[in-house]
Amino acid sequence: KVWVQQVSNIGSTTPKAIILTMNTTVPSGASGAAWAFTDRVYCAYNNGNDGVFEPLLSTANIVSNLANRREGTVDAVFRSPSDKEESNDGMNCIDGRRPFPPPEDITTTQGGGEGDPHIHTLGGEHYLLLNQGSFTFWRYSGVEAEAHSKKEPVDFQIYAHYSGHSSYTKGLLLVDRSGGGPLNEAKQVMELTAEDCRWRKRTSSGPWQPVEGQVEADAEKMTTFHVVTSPGQKMHVELLVKSGADGFKKIAALFASCKPHHHINMKMAMFSKDDVRLVGGQLGARGHDTSNQYHADNAALASFLEGSSQKLQMDQNFLTSKDWTDLGGSISAEAYLKQADEEGPALLQSCSTDAEEEARATCSKFLGNPATPQETFRGPWTTFQETFQDCIFDVCTGGGEAAAELAAEILNAF
């Protein structure tokens, strides 16, 4: 088991101990030492047989919320042999480099969209979107879940609305259409716009309501959203599917950073390679239609994009012709998005060498120095260098410090 102590309250939630049971590998007895390196935790067992294990904290799944504690499960992997020892202790190296290379069997996969927007797919593609409108950003379907002794289809969808000649993200829409039923019937919906950066939610028959603080998973539902808040404008939304009589399987988690009257950055984490294979939309890992690629006429801009390993995409195959309200969104959000849209196609911009250097300094202020390898971003979908180059592009073409600030938030999410 892994014991975690919550040290500060979230909203009205009282701090509680969290007890996570390892559900993939179970060493014997209690560990003799535990350490934290950067964003990883390691446990060493002194019996000379079990060795060092790493609980994969991104796989933690809370299944019960008791009066004085929370309980759940967590995956763990073997990391290294360890000598038999009678007396030892751990030491935390919060800023230290991890002592072990990433294990091959870590299954967390990440993807997202930031800034102009720069899209990072779950399959590792990196491209700049040159279009505006409402797009299918992520969709998970093709499986069934059981509820009340009946199996029904799972269908989670996330739409992103990109507005203006620079195509910044202005709206996000999470829609749960699981369970079949009428084509346009949504069981539950969550919405975020850059107008005020406040999440709102509704059920199929209920009115829109603001999301205030943490929202626990509904144990009676086959699929549900679990909302976890943190200080500032940060929020995680976990997309859960019923697993067994009393628990849920965490399919994905969405993190969104938002600055009012600017834009939204978003990042998805998924925890099973089998689930990643079922994803459609812009983040889908199955490759993009090369007929949607666009070629820059500006030589300086083309060189910049090539240096950051980015393509230009139109993503017409993911663009929907439906209005925001037809997708499940609110009337007020649709009005805001129409106001944010601009006539004509998205525009490619470039900047001078001096402006690029100023942008580099701004990005370094928020993201750090790219000359040193960074380990704050996990997963195959991006690197610190890619995010840094994206930041320079956005700041240099008019995004300002807000673009760098939001890039830093999304870089360190999860």
Image (cartoon, rainbow, N blue to C red):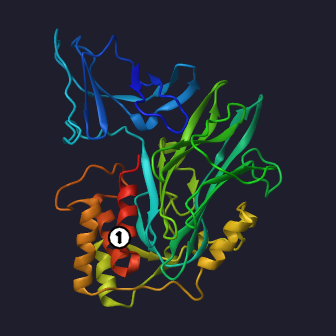
Quarter in which the N terminus is drawn: top left
> Residue placed at 28% from the left, 28% from the top?
42
Q: Quadrant location of residue 24?
A: top left
Picture layout, residue 148 above or below residue 304: above
Tell me if residue 122 can be seen.
no
Q: Which of 214 and 34 is in front in this view?
A: 214
Provide the residue designation for mark 1: 401
Label count reads 1
Residue 146's x, y, as percent? 71, 33
Instruction: Tell me which amino acid carries mark 1.
Output: Glu
Q: In this view, does 377 lie to the left or right of 285?
A: left
Q: In this view, does 203 lie to the left or right of 315?
A: right
Tell me if residue 145 can be seen.
yes
Residue 400's x, y, as percent? 37, 74
Q: In this view, does 198 lie to the left or right of 388?
A: right
As helix, strand or loop, the secondary structure at mark 1 comes to helix
Q: Quadrant location of residue 125?
A: bottom left
Q: Nearer the viewer, residue 247 or 169?
A: 169
Residue 244's x, y, as percent? 64, 26
Picture layout, residue 131 above or below residue 86: below
> Residue placed at 72% from the left, 46% from the top?
178
> Residue placed at 57% from the left, 77% from the top?
132
Query: Label 1 neighbourhood size at 10 Å, few (<14), some (14-19), many (20+)?
Result: some
Q: Nearer the viewer, residue 21 or 296?
A: 21
Residue 310's x, y, as percent? 37, 72
